[in-house]
Amino acid sequence: MCHRVLAGLPVMKTMLGAVALATCFAAGAASFPEASPQSQGFATARLERLDRYLESTVARGDYLGVVSIVLRNGRVVDWRAVGHRDGARTQPLQRNAIFRIDAMTRTVTAAAMLILMEEGRLNLDDPVAAYLPELRSLRLGDGTAPRAAVTIRQLLSQTAGFGADAAAQATLDGAPDTAEYARRLAALPLATEPGSRFRDDAICAVVAGRVIEAVSGLRLDAFLHKRIFLPLQMRDTAFIVAPGERYRIAAVATTDATGALVTLAQPVAPGQRITPYLNGAVGLYSTAEDYARFAQMLADGGSLDGATVLGRKSVELMMQNHLSHLAPPTHDEYGAEGYGLGGSVVLDLARRARLGSVGQFGWTGAQSTWFTVDRQEGLVAVLMLQHVPQRVLGDPARPSVRVANLLYQALVR
């Protein structure tokens, strides 16, 4: 299904049956205002290049299906679903399809931590052990104590120094809850000195989720629901998908050695928790619309539709480069992107070699989901698909690079 948003034309939601009506409510109750691309500074013909690209990738079998949504100045200018949600390609992908967002969960966890900071319940440079005493005696691999304690800021900027090999990670992932996860982590050596290196793994954000629980007195899922999902009307974002809504979950696919698209068996049934514990790093399910509401809140300085989740200065802090003390102060192979609190920050457009803006903020998921918040341009975009890239014949690169170029080339004012 494809949908071009035109000013004054409502989204069609006429459906039959109780299940369809529930889907309609979930997809449409918190919809954004819509506008024509031209009224928001896009050249319509140029924006259609993005649409044609997404359609062509699905048509030639690169991906099972894709949902994309683009907003300018808080108004939807393009929102479409292309392809199928199942490996047999019998079920068309709908715009309200549910996806595992993987590492895009970290940005939500970081926002939750900043809420507690705003309430005076913690500071970013507080030692984590002040809230999780079991982590007071962390040691490096040689048995020595680190020169400085792990801080909350380091959790959110992926620089805390944690690390685990496959066996240790399996032990962590078997923890029944975040409290036990932290206790098991305390027995593992640090991989590096805290604050000395960026490391893209899940441990930091899982520990951040545990800190949120310890400080707030609520389970992580309850805190996120109460303080972020409910005020932002993110009705389909959670660690578990209700059984009656699991038919909306998109299948996970990859490319085999011949270049053919194949679905992947998952270690847990779709819609259930990805790990036994509440995983603040990679554990959330969401929809394109729901995550766009979260991203638009950030773009608008912490508020959306009258609900204030964060203060504007906290959003500004979130989108600063918190790797500035490192040499180089970047995390990517090009030396072009720093890392804020829960997401990447563009520092150098020339080194990055793609269209965008300095200060642009966002992140990706392991299964090719992507979002970006460009406050300079008033632009928000979310890309949802479930494709695990493989370095084999015929597998396309992550689509977010081309999508970013096709998105920004369409801006004319």
Image (cartoon, rainbow, N blue to C red):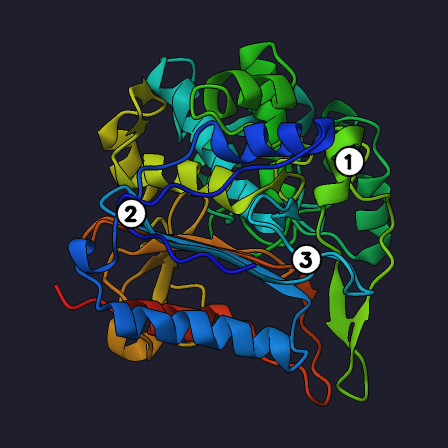
Identify the mark nearer the N-term, 2 or 1.
1
Q: Is residue 144 above or below residue 24?
A: below
Which residue was labeled with disc 1?
A: 273
* Rendered location of residue 282, percent (x, y): 64, 44
**Identity of the residue furthest to the top in this view:** 217
**Amino acid type indicated by mark 3:** Pro
Q: Is residue 186 above or below residue 332?
A: above
Identify the mark nearer the N-term, 3 or 2.
3
Residue at the spot 29% in from the left edge and 47% down from the top edge = 320
Name the quarter where the C terminus is drawn.
bottom left
Mark 2 vs mark 1: give the one in front: 1
Along the line of sight, which residue is nearer the eye, 176 or 14? Answer: 14
The numbered mark at residue 320 is: 2
Asked if the residue at tag 1 contacts the one at tag 2, i.e. Cβ–Cβ closer than 8 Å, the answer is no
The numbered mark at residue 92 is: 3
Identify the mark nearer the N-term, 3 or 1.
3
Name the quarter where the N terminus is drawn.
bottom right
Mark 3 vs mark 2: give the one in front: 3
Q: Is residue 54 above or below residue 25?
A: below
Examine the rendering and report whether any part of residue 146 can be seen: no
Q: CA distance from mark 2 to mark 1?
A: 32 Å
**Amino acid type indicated by mark 1:** Arg
* Rendered location of residue 279, percent (x, y): 68, 36
